[in-house]
């Protein structure tokens, strides 16, 4: 766990310089650094899917719609051709290619069965699921047990 958090934080630091230049050139592109401390991210990585509306990836949007605002939860969908961030298939912003590559490597995405993961506000990978998408309740239980979420709920 510790190494994955450090890895994603290093990616965020390395990419933060790029994100300001990218934002000026094309505000639609998102980097990992843009997401840190702003969103908890439910990642769906399916390198055999042609686009973000693949049947194997749509359960992610159901989880997001169930209670996204309360938990600062958004989706990041990685397919064979790109990676997109947002709440619904119609409202997705592209993720920068180097951020996509970093996530594919970190999550060990392979062709075949999809991988689902939760990335916390701190940028660390909190949980992975292989094959089937997690249920809304499994995602919410995991997030609600996170120390930052516990503090949010207490109003700290």
Image (tube, rainbow, N blue to C red):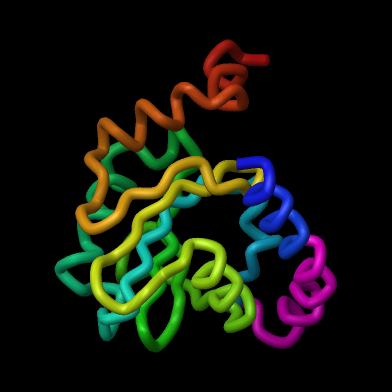
Image location (x, y in percent) of residue 153:
53, 17
Residue found at the very far left of the displayed protein = 55
| Residue beneath the point at 45% across and 44% down | 73
Question: Where is residue 105, by image quadrant?
Answer: bottom right
Residue positioned most to the top: 154
Residue positioned 23% across, 50% down in the render:
62
Q: Quadrant of residue 109?
A: bottom left
Residue at left 20%, top 54%?
A: 132
- The secondary structure making up most of the magenta span is helix
What range of the chain is rendered magenta? 13-28
Q: Position of residue 111 (x, y in %)?
A: 31, 78
Q: Does the stretch in magenta take in 76?
A: no
Residue 97, placed above or below residue 85: below
Q: Quadrant of residue 127?
A: top left
**Image height check: is 89 above or below 25?**
above
The answer to which of 37 and 117 lies nearer the viewer is: 117
Q: Quadrant of the C terminus?
A: top right
Image quadrant holding the N terminus, namely top right
Q: Nearer the viewer, residue 93 or 128?
A: 128
Tell me, yes or no, whether the highlighted magenta stretch contains residue 24.
yes
Q: Position of residue 61 (x, y in %)?
A: 28, 55
> How many numbered discs sit on the rendered protein?
0
The vertical placement of 114 against 26, above or below, is: above
At a point 46% along the width and 66% down the height, the residue shown is: 108
Q: Viewed as shown, does residue 62 lie left or right of 81?
A: left
From the viewer's perspective, tell me whether residue 27 is left or right of residue 40: right
78 relative to 52 in the view: left or right? right
């Amino acid at each position: 766990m510790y190494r994955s958090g450090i890895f994603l934080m290093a990616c965020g630091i390395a990419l933060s310089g790029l994100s300001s230049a990218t934002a000026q050139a094309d505000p639609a592109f998102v980097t990992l650094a843009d997401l840190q401390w702003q969103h908890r991210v439910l990642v769906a990585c399916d390198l055999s899917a042609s686009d973000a509306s693949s049947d194997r990836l749509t359960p992610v949007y159901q989880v997001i719609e169930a209670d996204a605002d309360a938990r600062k939860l958004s989706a990041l969908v990685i397919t064979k051709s790109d990676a997109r961030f947002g709440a619904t298939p119609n409202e997705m912003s592209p993720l920068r290619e180097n951020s996509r590559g970093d996530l594919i490597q970190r999550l060990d995405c392979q062709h075949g069965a999809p991988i689902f993961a939760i990335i916390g506000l701190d940028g660390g990978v909190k949980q992975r699921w292989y094959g089937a998408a997690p249920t809304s309740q499994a995602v919410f239980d995991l997030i609600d047990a996170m120390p930052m979420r516990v503090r949010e709920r207490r109003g700290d």
